[in-house]
Image (cartoon, rainbow, N blue to C red):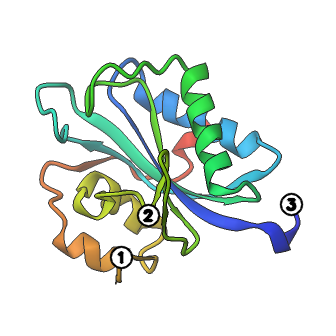
Amino acid sequence: MSPDNRNVASLGLGGNLGDPRAAMAEALQAIDRHEDCRIVAVSRLYVTPPWGKTDQADFFNCCALVETMLEPQALLDLCLSIERQMKRVRMERWGPRTIDIDVLTYGDRVSKTETLALPHPRMTERGFVIMPLADIAPDLMVDGASVREWLEKADIAGITVADDDRSWWRRS
């Protein structure tokens, strides 16, 4: 990739069906293999209580930073394509899933289309996003505050570290 055309985006990944750890590792590896993307950092792996719809199994969550030459919509399309290849089925909002890949931020862009809002709506309210994102981008500014500052306000009750080794996704 040419250094002039690269942007850094942050991604949030999660899942609670099947083997979510393996699914997230597979998704990260697929993104990293894409000719216009390179994973530059991955957070620790977390176990998090369900959010929104609470009568389901705990989730595994992580965040990643990706250098990319893809525009934001193309990056989202890549993530959705990987979800489909991995048999992601969208049955209910906030419901159980094998894999979920969200584009959280894309550089310092602020935009909203029918399919993509940057930064991701409500990401600052979700401990399962902010806690792993703070591992890899504590100084990233989102909605006027750093991720570190958002973490101080976030509800992180029940969130635990499942794997402290940030290369967990390469071993899976």
Label 3 packing within 10 angstroms: few (<14), some (14-19), many (20+): few
C-alpha span from label 2 to label 3: 24 Å
Amino acid type at circle 2 is Pro
Q: Is residue 91 visible?
A: yes
Amino acid type at circle 3 is Met
Nearer-the-camera pick, 115 or 100? 115
Q: Which structural element holds mark 2?
A: loop
Q: Position of residue 30 (x, y in %)?
A: 68, 36
Nearer-the-camera pick, 112 or 21? 112
- Residue at (50%, 28%) from the top-left corner? 22
- Residue at (26%, 70%) from the top-left corner? 151
Contact, CB < 8 Å: mark 1 with mark 2?
Answer: yes
Q: Which structural element holds mark 1?
A: loop
Residue tagged by mark 1?
143
Eyeballing the image, is 172 above or below 68?
above
* Total labels drawn: 3
Residue tagged by mark 2?
119
Q: Which structural element holds mark 3?
A: loop
Q: Quadrant of the N terminus?
A: bottom right
Residue tagged by mark 3?
1
